[in-house]
Image: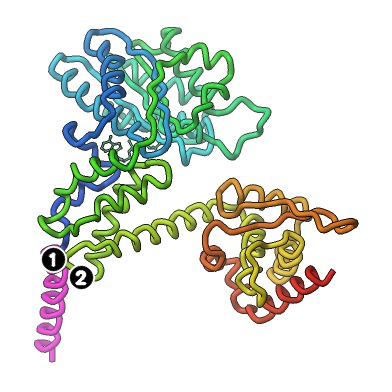
Amino acid sequence: MGDGDGDGQQSLSQSIKGRLQEGVQNSVFKNKSLLDPDTVIDEDRIVGRDEQLDDTITYLRPTLQGNRPPNMLLYGPSGTGKSLIINAVCEQVIELAEGQDIRFGVVKINCQTIKSHDRAVYRLVENAAAQAGVEVGVPESGVSTDQKLIRFYEILSDHFDSVIIILDEIDLLAGRQRDPNDEPAYSKLLYQLSRASQLGRIEGHVSVAALTNDPRFMEELDGRAESSFNPQDIVFPDYDANQLQSILERRQDAYQDDVLEDGIIPLSAALAAQDHGDARKAIDLFRKAGEIADRRDEDRIREEHVRDAQKEAERDRTLTQMQGLSTQKKLSLYATAIVPVYSTRSLSTVPSTVAYRVYQYITDLLDADEKSRDSYLRYMNEAETYNFVTSKKRGRGYGGGVHKEYAFVDDPSVVAETLREDFRLEQAGHDEDLIRSVVNAQIEEFFDI
Ligand SMILES: Nc1ncnc2c1ncn2[C@@H]1O[C@H](COP(=O)(O)OP(=O)(O)OP(=O)(O)O)[C@@H](O)[C@H]1O
């Protein structure tokens, strides 16, 4: 029996091994890392961007001549090559600096998920310590931000002759948390970092490269931050469909020969160009189409795979954005989404009056706080800025008052389903029939007036 089990075990692991290898051997990909968003590709795969590349090279050249490079502001919509260009140039500077015995360091943080100025400073210390190969040397909490900054300056002074600090997505630093009357966290950070070098608190040369999608970023900076940061601007415009097509063509060796049907590259480029010409989106579609073909065990990539990849990407986007919403915002959006889903009338827009009553019913059902109608409207304003809905004001004639009508940008049933996966809203799924009748009763009442 023991033997038999052993054999069974062996054949199971053989079969797992076989299946794993099968997947690898039959994949449509040859070098998938070329389509990985974090890969810094070789220069010959970079399309256009000559001007931005020239400017970045010009600004960073002083590093190799023993001088301080200027601060830089790289701005343009997402996926237009800001990180790619600065990283590609920094990689070359690192190599050349090594040959010249210059201790050059690149300290890089993405500010998008950093919740406060203090956290950003700590992440800078961590990153600098890792680059220098030393202990972080300060605790994450329990000491002041100033102490963390002092440690940061110490690491930079002791271990580098020249440092570039890259602050990616700088405008999002502590973005949504902030009190509009306070100085933004990024403004404070930029001021401190650019002053530290000017005041000699750091011995070597330090310059800051800030990356942002926000063209009005400099207007939001506090006056003293603006004058001490004082960057050289490098602008990254959108790509058009032809440029996106060339970007993909130069990476088609990510795939095995002859697996791409005609039209795959132009279609991926055209779909990405419809948005705003985002190269990340084009590359993601191009990669996802291959992943779908692999998943379905097909050996060629067809247009259908690209279109399905586009649908998957939309769902992922909705999901990620919704995860960031607070419970009350989720409840408001959910109550609004189920109105057209459950309605027996065909509704192209949802009257806020109906949605708010459904919201009240659902908060009661889930034993959640019930907020005022004004709060509900505010939450929905935010849903509008996230592009889940669009709204219009509607009057209902004399004495009827004014209300808002919401239209969903994507399918409201996808929105409702995605939100229901949230643990608090799960219960709403159990009482579906009841909610359906409440929705329809509210709709009838509204249209009967
Ligand atoms: N000109 C280009 N040639 C080739 N690939 C490019 C080009 N521009 C961008 N890419 C690729 O597109 C993807 C996104 O680019 P990148 O991360 O540089 O965008 P970004 O402008 O920094 O975006 P975000 O503001 O969202 O951070 C990367 O995979 C990058 O390699």
Instruction: Mark 2 and ligand 1: say if the CB distance to the nearest ligand atom is below 8 Å.
Output: no
Q: What secondary structure is marked by label 1? A: loop
Residue at (14, 48) in percent of width and height = 253
**Can residue 398 be seen from the camera position used here?**
yes
Cβ–Cβ under 8 Å for marks 2 and 1? yes
- Quadrant of the image where one finds ligand 1: top left
Residue 107 location, x and y as percent?
Answer: 34, 27
With 311 as the anchor, is 386 left or right in this view?
A: right
Q: Residue at x 36, y 39 (%)?
A: 79
User: What residue type is disc 2 on?
Assistant: Asp
Which corner quadrant of the image does residue 90 belong to?
A: top left
What residue is shown at x 85% (from left), y 57% (from top)?
397
For residue 137, say whether it is visible. no
Badge 2 marks a residue whose secondary structure is loop
Numbered range of the magenta stretch: 1-26
User: Which residue matches tag 2?
Assistant: 297
What residue is drawn where x is 52% and y is 55%? 323
User: What is the number of the mark on residue 26?
Assistant: 1
Residue type for callout 1: Asn
Q: In the figure, residue 193 lies in which quadrant?
A: top left
- Tell me if mark 1 has few (under 14), some (14-19) or many (20+) residues whose alpha carbon lies within 10 angstroms of its own: few
Which of disc 1 and disc 2 is earlier in sequence? 1
